[in-house]
Each structure stands twice: as C-alpha cells, then as structure tokens.
Image: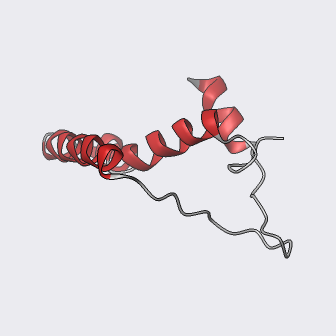
Amino acid sequence: METAVDRRLSLDFVTDDAGYARPWNIHFTEDARSPLNDFRKTVREWEAGAEGLMLSIAGKFPGMMIHLRASAFFPKRVGHR
C-alpha cells in the first residue's frame, strides 16, 4: 500500500494542449455509473459506523478507485510518464 501511495503522490499533473495543468473529466456510461453508485452507497454505510481518520478518508474512496482504475487504462492521461 505504501508503494501505491508513493507512486500516486509522485505523479505530475497532466497538461492540456496549451500547457496548463488541469483536471480531466471522465464521462461514464450508465453501465459504469450504476456499479459506482452502488459502491458510493456502500461507502456511505461504512461512514455511518466510522470515526476519526477512517471517517475523513472513506468519502474519498470512490474517487480514488476511479483514479487508480483510470491510471491503469489511460496512464498518459493521469500523469504517468
């Protein structure tokens, strides 16, 4: 896990055609949106029973999952060299 976090933190921001760093939007089909929404609901249930640091990070899980998955399929888009 430490290696994964270190790799994620070492990524450079992606730049657009003008050279500006900016976030990229990923649009989901309904087939992709449905399981993600199910996962978000599960995370909300986890949050209800969490406290402290777990509570502060649990809400980030869906976005982190998307980013890690996108990193595997689109490495140049999400900052890998």
Residue 47 rendering spot, x and y as whole percentages: 20, 45
Horizontal side of residue 4 vs 45, given as left or right: right
Frontmost residue, 39 versus 50? 39
Residue 18 rendering spot, x and y as whole percentages: 85, 76
Q: Residue drawn 75% across and 58% down?
A: 14
Count of numbered circles in the view: 0
Frontmost residue, 36 versus 40? 36
Q: Residue drawn 18% across and 46% down?
A: 41
Residue 40 rendering spot, x and y as whole percentages: 25, 47
What colour scheme does the image use? Answer: secondary structure
Horizontal side of residue 67 vs 63, given as left or right: right
In the rendered image of this protein, does residue 69 appear above or below residue 63? above
Q: Quadrant of the C terminus?
A: top right
Horizontal side of residue 43 vs 16, given as left or right: left
> Which image quadrant is residue 24 in?
bottom right
Residue 75 rendering spot, x and y as whole percentages: 71, 40
In the rendered image of this protein, does residue 24 appear above or below residue 59? below
Horizontal side of residue 76 vs 53, given as left or right: right
Q: Residue drawn 77% across and 41% down?
A: 80
Q: Quadrant of the N terminus?
A: top right
